[in-house]
Image (cartoon, grey):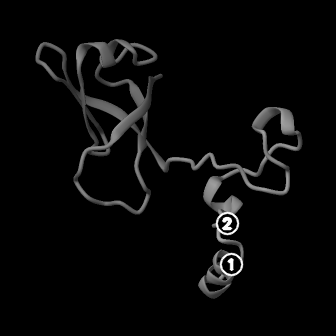
Amino acid sequence: MSFKNFLRIVEAGGGAVVSTSWTGSSAPDTLSLSGHPPSLPGLDLGLPAITKSGQIVHLIKDKNPIYVQLSDGTKLFFNLDEFRRIKGFPEVGRTMTVVFQRNSGDLSEQPSQIQSCQVS
């Protein structure tokens, strides 16, 4: 949808349209689940996520926050409660997969929220 078409729709109807490419999913085909007709997209705007995976190179458990560094250079900091929620048993040499809330185009050094973490 071009910006001109978007403005025409907003001016004519007084509302905005969110395409399914922004929400990541279209509405379910029944009114009982979401309460809106199937012709409209859902408003479940998905958060961008990026997955990093690598071997654990450094692991410092005796300090707060707990420090983990992966072979690809990713540095992770966990408090004790977050560290206990990691699926699997973290130790040097094992492979860790981490999912961050972050846009894939963001190359800054700013910290990101960790969605999930698993050791295999």
Numbered label attached to residue 17: 2
- Dot 2 amino acid type: Val
Q: Position of residue 89 (x, y in %)?
A: 39, 13
User: What is the quadrant of the N terminus in the image?
Assistant: bottom right
- Dot 1 amino acid type: Met
Using the image, determine if residue 114 lies above or below residue 101.
above
Q: In terms of secondary structure, where does tag 2 sit?
A: loop
Q: Nearer the viewer, residue 107 or 101?
A: 101
Rendered image quadrant of residue 94 = top left
Using the image, determine if residue 1 lies above or below residue 92.
below
CB under 8 Å between discs 1 and 2: yes
Tell me if mark 2 has few (under 14), some (14-19) or many (20+) residues whose alpha carbon lies within 10 angstroms of its own: few
Find the residue positioned furthest to the bottom: 4
Apparent side of residue 101 relative to residue 74 in the rendered image (left or right): right
Apparent side of residue 41 relative to residue 95 in the rendered image (left or right): right
Tell me if mark 1 has few (under 14), some (14-19) or many (20+) residues whose alpha carbon lies within 10 angstroms of its own: few
| Disc nearer the start of the sequence (1/2) | 1
The residue positioned 32% from the left and 45% from the top of the image is: 72
The residue positioned 78% from the left and 56% from the top of the image is: 40
Q: Position of residue 19 (x, y in %)?
A: 68, 64
Find the residue positioned furthest to the right: 30
Numbered label attached to residue 1: 1
Q: Position of residue 22 (x, y in %)?
A: 61, 60
Q: Nearer the viewer, mark 1 or mark 2?
A: 2
The residue positioned 61% from the left and 82% from the top of the image is: 7
Q: Nearer the viewer, residue 85 or 56?
A: 85
Q: Position of residue 105 (x, y in %)?
A: 41, 63
